[in-house]
Amino acid sequence: MLTKTEKADIVKDLEAKLAAQRVVIFSDFHGLSVAKQQELRRLLKKDDAEFRVAKKTLFRRAFEIAKAPFSHIDYKGELGAIFGFGDEVGPAKLLAKFAKANPESLKIVGGLLGSRELSKAEVLVLAKLPSKQELVGQLVWVLASPLRGLANVLNGNQRKLVVALSQILKQKSS
């Protein structure tokens, strides 16, 4: 049984995480072994995210203080929250992959993107998006494409000139 000061500390910790988060994903982790939870925590830590378990009433208090929506208080089952502090898509991708590998013990319930509440389906759509690094790579590719095309066109004229000169040299030497 937690004391009032321990509960207040948990609420303050959750409130601080809510202030710093970019995405929060709620999951039902009933049946997930401690070893699997530790594995999930390790994977999330690499992605600048954190898995936090608390009572729903403590989640509700922290969300009320932070003025963030929390409609999962009526959810029947154990509720854990993944707080993503970096890329918004990374934790969703990781959790969707982990839930697919452990379908009987980990289920995505919903989430928050900034201050907007997400359904389970929206979290799964978020998980299918490319990550921030992939999008930056695609943008660089698109921006560099005209330059590559111009370089190829300019090189093509030089190549044609060299071929023409070598043909003239062959004709004069023969």
Image: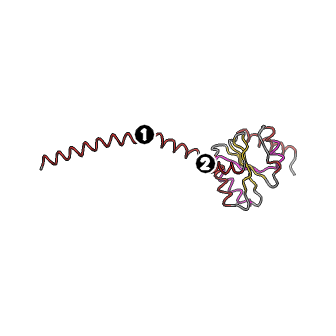
Residue 7, percent from left and from top: 84, 45
Q: Answer with left or right where residue 5 lies relative to residue 164.
A: right
Indicate which disc, 2 or 1, sits on the residue closer to the N terminus: 2
Residues rendered magenta in the picture: 32-61
Q: Answer with left or right where residue 132 lies relative to residue 84.
A: left
* Residue at 66% in and 57% down: 98
In this rendered view, identify the residue nearer to me: 125 or 114. Answer: 125
Contact between labelled residues 1 and 2, with CB atoms less than 8 Å apart: no
107 above or below 15? below
Magenta stretch: includes residue 58? yes
Q: CA distance from mark 2 to mark 1?
A: 26 Å
* Residue at 42% in and 39% down: 146
Q: Secondary structure at mark 1?
A: helix
Residue 6, percent from left and from top: 84, 45
Residue annotated with mark 1: 146
Residue annotated with mark 2: 129
What crowding class fits label 1: few (fewer than 14 Cα within 10 Å), some (14-19), or many (20 or more)?
few
Specify the amino acid type for callout 2. Leu
* Residue at 79% in and 41% down: 63
159 above or below 95? above
Specify the amino acid type for callout 1. Pro
Residue 90, percent from left and from top: 63, 48
Q: Answer with left or right where residue 94 lies relative to residue 63.
A: left
Q: Secondary structure at mark 2?
A: loop
Residue 41, percent from left and from top: 69, 53
